[in-house]
Each structure stands twice: as C-alpha cells, then as structure tokens.
Amino acid sequence: MPVGFWVFPWDIEDEGIDRFAARLEQLGVTSASPSVLYHSGRALLPRAREHKVRLLGGPGANYPFESLEAPFAGMESESAPRSGKRFWQRLAEALSDRGIRLDAWAMPMHGSELGRRLPLGVVRNCFGNPYSYALCPSHPQARRFAESLVGELARSQIFGAIRLESIGYLGYRHFHHHEAEYVGHGPLEELFLSLCFCDACMAGARREGISVVELRAAISRDLERRWRDDVWSVGTDDVREALAANDDLQAFISYRQATVASLVSSLAELCHSESTELHCFSAIFPPTLEHSTWIEGTDFAAWSRVLDRLIVFGYTAGGPGAAKVDEGWTRSELEYVGRYFDPSKVNVVLNLAPQYLATLDDAKRRFGTISGMGFNDLSITNYGMTGETRLNWVPELRRVLDAPASST
C-alpha cells in the first residue's frame, strides 16, 4: 500500500539527495512531498546535523519560481535549495530510480509574506480587521497567483502531483504568532470571526443577491453582544440553528464554497493539461470536516468531480495545540469524507509524534483502523521532524497496511 512522507527540502539537502532517497527506499516509502511554498514558523529537527531548531521567516518559496508576477516575484526563501531547479530534477531522478514518486507540497493562500505583498487581497473579518496570513480566494490577484504557481509546477514535469494545503478561506483559528483570547469562544463565534468581508467578497456576494452589508453588520453586533453578555456557543447545533434562521448567512456560505470550488476546478485543469495530478487538503484547523464547509468554504461534492485525491488529517483536530484525538474521531471523519469520495481517492495524513500516538502499538492500531475502513493511501508528516526511533516504525506500520483485513 502507498505510504508517503511530507518533508522540508532543507532536510533533504542536509542529508544529501542520494542518502535521503536510499533511506526512503529502506523504509518502504512510495512517495515524497517536499514543500515548494511554505509559511513562516519554527521547526524542531531532531536528526538535523546543524540546524536542530530552524526559524522559517521571510519569503517562503523553496522552489525557484520563474513565472510569478509582481508582487509575488522573487520570493525564494533563505532556506531554499541553492542549486535551484537542478536540485528538484536530481531529486526526482534519484527517487524515480527507486520507484518513489516526487510530489510538490504548496500553500498558495497561507503565509504572512503573501499578505505583506498583497495587503488588499487578504481575508478581512466582519469588523474590517485583516488576517495578514491569509489571501482571500475571491480576490482576482490571489487567484492568478495560485494559478501561476500551480501551472509552473505542473509544466515542469518534475512532480507527479501538486498537493495544495490551505487552498480555501483561512479562518480565525489558523494561527498567527502568539494568539490570545479571554472571552468565551465556541463554534459559532469561530465561524463569525472566520467569514471574509473584503471588497472582493462583498462584491461577489452582492452579485449573488446576498444582503451582505446587513449580514456583516448583524454578525458584528452579535459578536459584540456575546462578548458583552458573557455568552458563547457550545456545539455545532448552534451553528446549524444560526444558518437555519438566516437565509443570507446560508447563501454567503454557499457563495464561499462556490468560489473555492471554481478555483480548485481551474487548478485541476492546469494540472491535468500537463498530465499531473491535483491533490487538495480538506481542512486545516477547523475541528471537523463539517466545520470546514462553513469556515474554509470546502465543497466536497464539487471537489470530488475534479480532484485526483483528497487529503485529510487522521491525527488531530483544532490545530497543533489540540489534545490527542481518539480513533472514534478518526473513524467519524473518514465516514464523513466517504460520503463524497471513494476511499481509493483519499490520502490520510498521520503524525507519529508522541502527543498523537504514544506507542508503536497505538500507531499500529490507528493504521489498522484506517486501513480496515478501506483507506489505504497514507502519508506521514514530517520526515525531518520525526525522531529516529519513530522513523524506524514505518516498515512495521507498512506491514499493517499490507496485511489481510481479517488480521487487523
């Protein structure tokens, strides 16, 4: 069964292309997905020779993009491979010689550097406050940027698939520096703070006949009332009730879904014209896939008609600060996505870190649960951030996937 690894390109440089490819072959890995466009952050790399802790800042392009126009031209990161496109070609060759596919992992809508370069194209909440880490998929220039980026990667013929993370509307919970909040906060408040009312979204919603000015004002008033009166939502039923009570809110959610779906469809056409697959993440920080339809504008039914593969998290909900989720959550999420996608078209991402899977037996059970539901394309994040002991779990975990269903 396929097992892939997500990886940062500087970890490959640190190890050397040939040693990296040989290690993946030894582990039984079938694909590698290095980041070609990443956001700022901090990474702990326990096996690195020198940079055990790496700060990721500034421009985030790890691939030498040549077709990006202003204001996105010249975004190559300090961490980018120094040998340019030749690095990626040599990596593809070394992996191909061992039967391993090279895919490209990119975040076309997420990154403070992107927002700095296109400040009028970022998500803006109902109060008009910008989310500088999030480009808005309604904004024409942001859409052209995504199309240019994906088109160049596909035309390079280096990658088997383009794997896009953060392709929709990034919500309030998508994290920026050190977040702090001291008022009650539940699913409805998160949705309200995640809705974008930038000029492009306002204009698009008005074209659809949505009373978006009134909707924005009503949401702002409701949030301020909740903060003043010390009340907050406690579950998703509150969201469903709010949607049922407000036709404009329902229509605005649908507008957002159609906006993201049209972008995904355009990117799929670019990829397929170059015989390259397009894979997209289902959701990033919303706590469930259902939340992602409201917060990020995900439309699984529309995506299923154009995507070669949907990528879902099988290890966490609500972001890196969330508590470890159990198998019940994983099973529920996969059942949800199974309404729209055949399991053969779904890649499930797992994390071997102790906070998610305490022991090898825990990992084997999780792999077995996922495989037993028919989802047999798994990825592990992240190669350079995984410790040596847990990296060596991979061959045994592969055997779980390859075992007959009755034995799991």
Image (cartoon, rainbow, N blue to C red):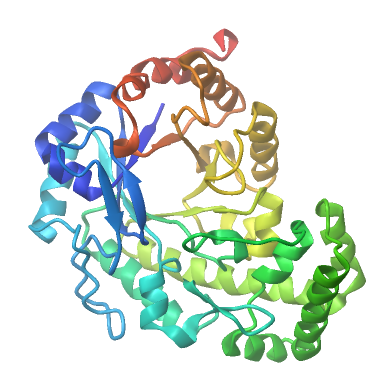
Q: Where residue 95 sits: x, y (%)?
A: 18, 38
Note whether 84 is above or below 50 in the view shown: below
Residue 140 can be seen in this image: no
Which image quadrant is residue 230 in? bottom right
Please identify the quadrant where the C terminus is shown.
Answer: top right
User: How many numbered badges does the structure rendering display?
Assistant: 0
Q: Where residue 49 sits: x, y (%)?
A: 15, 36
> Which residue is at the front of the view, 302 or 291?
291
Which residue is at the far top?
407
Name the residue rendered at 54%, 66% in the picture. Answer: 168
Residue 400 can be seen in this image: yes
Which image quadrant is residue 115 in? bottom left
Note whether 250 is above or below 402 in the view shown: below
Please identify the quadrant where the N terminus is shown.
Answer: top left
Q: Where residue 133 sits: x, y (%)?
A: 46, 70
Name the residue rendered at 60%, 23% in the picture. Answer: 369
Instruction: Classify residue 299 as left or right of residue 239.
Output: left
> Which residue is at the front of the view, 153 or 169?
169
Which image quadrant is residue 267 in? bottom left
Note whether 313 is above or below 110 in the view shown: above
Q: Where residue 225 sits: x, y (%)?
A: 85, 74
Name the residue rendered at 46%, 20% in the picture. Answer: 401
Instruction: Classify residue 408 as left or right of residue 339.
Output: left
